Amino acid sequence: MRGSVGLVLSSLLAGAAQAQAGNGVVQWSIQKRQPPVDVRRLGKRASTYEEVVTNEQTKGGYFATCRLGTPAQDLTLQLDTGSSDIWVPDSSAKICRATTSGGGCTLGAFDPSDSSTFNVTLPNEFDISYVDGSSSKGDYFTDVFEIGGATLQNMTMGLGSTTDIPYGLVGVGYAVNEAIVGNTGNISTAYANLPLHMMREGLINTNAYSLWLNDLDANEGSILFGGIDTEKYKGDLSKIQIYQTQRGIYSSFRVAMTSLQAVSPSGSDTLTSNDFPIPVVLDSGTTLSYLPQDLAQQVWKEVGAVYSPQFGLAVIPCYMATSKGSFSFGFAGPDGPRISVSMDELVLDLTNGSPPVFKSGEYKGEDACEFGIQNFTQAPYLLGDTFLRSSYVVYDLVNNEIGIAPTEFNSTKSNIVAFASAGAQIPSATVVPNQSQATDIPSVTSPAFAASKGFTDSASKDGVTNAAPGIPAAFGAGTAWMMIDGNGYGLCFSSFYFMRVIRAVAALNSSRAAASRHGVRYMSLGCRVALDTASPRWTASQLGTRGRYFSATSMSRAMSAADAALKQAKEQAAANMTPEAAAARMSPEEAKRLSQVRNIGIAAHIDSGKTTVTERILFYTGRVKAIHEVRGRDGVGAKMDSMELERERGITIQSAATFTDWRKKENGVDETYHINLIDTPGHIDFTIEVERAMRVLDGAVMVLCAVSGVQSQTITVDRQMKRYNVPRVSFINKMDRMGANPFKAVEQINNKLKIAAAAIQIPIGSEKEFEGVVDLVEMRAIRNDGQKGINLKISKEIPAELKELAEQKRQELIEKLADAAIRRATIALKFTPVVMGSAIADKSIQPMLDAVCDYLPNPSDVPNMALDLSRGEQPVALMPYNSLPFVGLAFKLEENPYGQLTYMRVYQGSLKKGQYLFNSRSSKKIRIPRIVRMHSNEMEDVAEIGAGEICAVFGVDCASGDTFTDGHLPYGLSSMFVPDAVMSLSISPKRSSDADAFSKAMNRFMREDPTFRLHVDEESEETIISGMGELHLEIYVERLRREYKVDCETGQPRVAYRETVQTRADFDFLLKRQSGGPGDYARVMGWVEPNPNHKEDNHFETQVVGGTIPDKYLAACGKGFQEACEKGPLLGHKVIGTSMIVTDGATHVTDSSDYAFNLASQMAFRKAFDEAGGQVLEPLMKTTITAPVEFQGSILMLMNKRGTIVDTEVGADDFTMVADCSLNAMFGFSSHLRAATQGKGDFSMEFSHYAPAAPHLQKELVAKYQKELEAKRTK
């Protein structure tokens, strides 16, 4: 399991140690020294049998110097017990040719042209990738491989010609994990990997090896092939079984962990977990150990470790390394071995620079370290180096057994005993009795934490010093970062050192170990994480806990649908299969299926009746058996409003997906259309739900009120449809309401939305007398009949009083369309056909469904484009054909009791259960364990989804907007537009015990909703949430209370102000500081002025001539300007619309640096800001109010105090007012509006633009901000 690339190796032993080979064993010495060795000489070694392997924590593994080729070339490779291939970087690889600082393959690279024995065996078949997105690809080859003086002829290895990893690996795991097996899907392609080849060459007697890592600070250890060293462990060597992963195949070193005890001077505790007995993998390629969530939390509580949600891991004061406490791990049942791990093995440096420091809480001022036991929320669970250093482990790959005993630390003696023959038992090992009891599930109890006090009391704060080196001068002092954990502890980091930790944490937050310093490596085309479908009970031959398994083997992968799909994709590529060729070969059945698919959304202004329309669609198509209304008036509520809050408030908060079939007569034959439907919210606060729906839909039904016509959110929805080129059918709802005027709505569509529209129906009757419609295309009357209007009465007899109107409107329709057909014009976005009805009265919904089938596009009618990432993001067309390689988009995430639910649109190819896909953004390979079709909050499992469809999948760790392919198409899809937040407020849980639940909820909300944001204010240390409006944040606070039982305190809402300048101001700023050593010197000259061309953007420009400021410092000036704009001088809000031009300056031969010029630019900008007329900008909201006419005067008075009235439209009963209002003035407006209109008025807001704040408001805001700063300074 490969770790992430560190900065440089602190040291590697370049000389040789005593070697031992022969008598059936080969030993690699594990050593750690720090001689002053040139990095370019790290691969050199003397000719001995014993390899040099360095314990290098910054890389997260153990490294060995080996020799390849003829003549021999020296390389340093990482040892990995979790994989099976040896692979080396090609010297011609781009990463090995890098010449920048820290670049290049400093541990050595292989040049095939310099080896006379080099032979390519499988071109382009070596392909391995990792969870962190790194990978290596190239040929399989054979060549001479030396481990010390012992030589292996024709060793099969991989050559990394295309790689972003600057060093290779030596895999010594089960051969079934070789990359070639996963690529070919054929277990017979497995070759003899290193230990097996050593056995065949007679170097060792059997395929087995033992591992002695020694303690954290030790200078030496060893991996011994073919034998054991009895002087390297204490007590007896116990033999426990390795459990199968799947179908009788062994692919990982998985054993049963059956107990865990905490022991300290104050007592001991037996820790329990719902996951016991726990399948754990023993793996030297993982730095830390990972246990189930509930067990890890008990361990943390014992030692006082602090889990940081933003950080994603547990941290602990560094002085806890001196604690006298320990943890005892038990295996294979009550009679099995126990391994004690002391605290000095579990406290690790968090960075390789200056240590982070706790800034608050009981650990304030203490150095922070990383704790060696972390949490997983699902399998696989891993025991890495923090455990293995305390245990001597023998890996027997023939008998599938593990020998384990406590380590004899720093042993200087040696007594090597070889395995007697092939398949011989582990020497000196005793079989653990009653291993069948390892499968017993113990009861779960709460520990008393009697050991907790002893852990902390026995630790000495004076006994620990941080061994990490100081900050390298090249990186400067860095920028301060603040992370606050769930218990209120603050950690202060420098930006340079913080970066490496984040990479590891990002994957742990997604319940998966990262291929980083703490990482776990997974094989390309053969992920070592899978779920079996075996019995939930444990058996003697197969270890699993309630469906949790660590790895899938190549055999299982070969039998999976993924391999068949990949093989098919290769065959298609070989045949030069183009979309056109696929279309030509499409079967009539597939063509007909595609032509009858409709992916539509229902979108409108709030309270236009979207959800009511959707409910009728589901009823008339037979998807639901009864109609229920919004607000849960009948105690049930509309099907698509599955959230309790939606039913209470009568509004849609989250978009909901469903699918249904509609039978339509065409030429006398019943045709069935498959409709995927998404019901979207109407309130502007939840506009992101509409955005992501429109991103993946082929068409939409835009619902309008027959009385109000085009309203504010209608305009927003229209803008979203145009942004994603979504054709629409317009449905004028509420035709039974008093004042209904459908032709006024048609006119508004033409005039306000600027899209040609014409009614293809006219109403029969109006208001209470509304009966049905006249179809102007077929010239027939359509009425609803029967209970709930389930039957249609169609007649060629048009009522006499409507004949003249019908002819008139039909002529208008023809004039609008000219010679184009309705369907063609609609799909081309040139026209919207208008239909009408009343959902609440159960009238004319069926004709609207016919219009959806007749006029909206099927997936093949809409051009969908991807970006070819291998050709500079050149656009390429996607075709919705099943026979093409898969391309899909994850457009929505949702937490579910079964895990993360990912909504996906399939644009090309088909998706099968069990198929493997690649994430184009992260390059991760994932397996699709379950596919469902959604019906609101209900799920229906399916085995396969065709091209052009919408589905949801489980078990996919991704972000909203990620593209998935079959791995052979370098395609990416553009994501959706995400608007900026306009409102913020501080929030904190009332009870400190709710911190974990609060953190979990916040992480979930941010993953699900891109417009919901959270950050910690550096100065106030408050948690701030931001969103699209008052209702948006109010809903999330309420969801916290209901779904997570967390009561929160919220502060006053905060407005997202901006700052800018009004005039030009010159600056000449000199930074000159001396503090005993090298000082800081930088002089910058120029001016600050408004950015006239882009009022929302900032601009930095240099006009320096004569080289008075070198180019490298000019870049630092630009960065300083951008950093200064992040926090303006007036209110601490972002600065926009400002230009900074640097024209001259001065440097000092020793004291000038990037840091000095960065800081000088920030200070010069702040000084010039006031002189340039610094100004506060406030957000203005486009506010639309609708209320009965009799309240017009009252509302005018309300709005005159809050903003500028832009437009007023008075109808028969209601009027609509549009105004630009200051957001700051709109807090609490809803209660004022209810009081002024007796609860009959409603309003909506959306961000319009930024405008200068009134002078008195600016003065008040600046004074308040200065007062807050002063209060913080005096604390």
Image (cartoon, grey):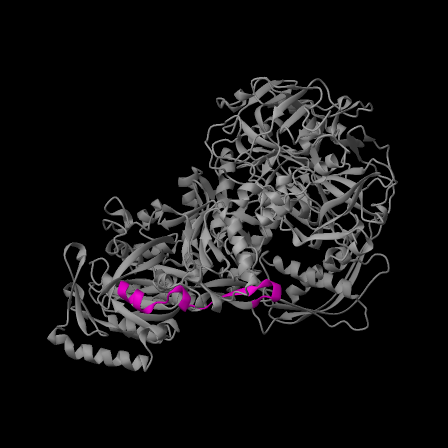
The structure residue drawn at horizontal position 39% and vertical position 40%, both measured from the top left corner, is 1042
Taking the view exactly as shown, the residue that stands out farthest to the left is 800
Counting from the top left corner in percent of width and height, residue 1103 is at 74, 72
Q: Foreground: 163 or 983?
A: 163
The structure residue drawn at horizontal position 21% and vertical position 80%, both measured from the top left corner, is 808
> Is residue 777 in view from this perspective?
yes
Counting from the top left corner in percent of width and height, residue 311 is at 60, 42
Instruction: Look at the image and tell me in which quarter the C terminus lies.
Output: top right
Counting from the top left corner in percent of width and height, residue 1141 is at 69, 70
Counting from the top left corner in percent of width and height, residue 1218 is at 37, 67
> Is residue 1189 in view from this perspective?
no
Q: Foreground: 542 or 449?
A: 542
> Looking at the rendering, which quadrant does residue 1261 occupy?
bottom right
User: Does 1158 appear above or below 533?
Assistant: below
Q: Foreground: 67 or 466?
A: 67
Q: Is residue 120 left or right of residue 785?
A: right
Instruction: Look at the image and tell me in which quarter the N terminus lies.
Output: top right
Q: Is residue 1041 left or right of residue 392?
A: left
Query: Does the segment drawn in magenta span residue 700?
Result: no
Q: Foreground: 8 or 350?
A: 8
Query: Does the segment drawn in magenta span residue 854?
Result: yes
Which residues are drawn in magenta? 849-874
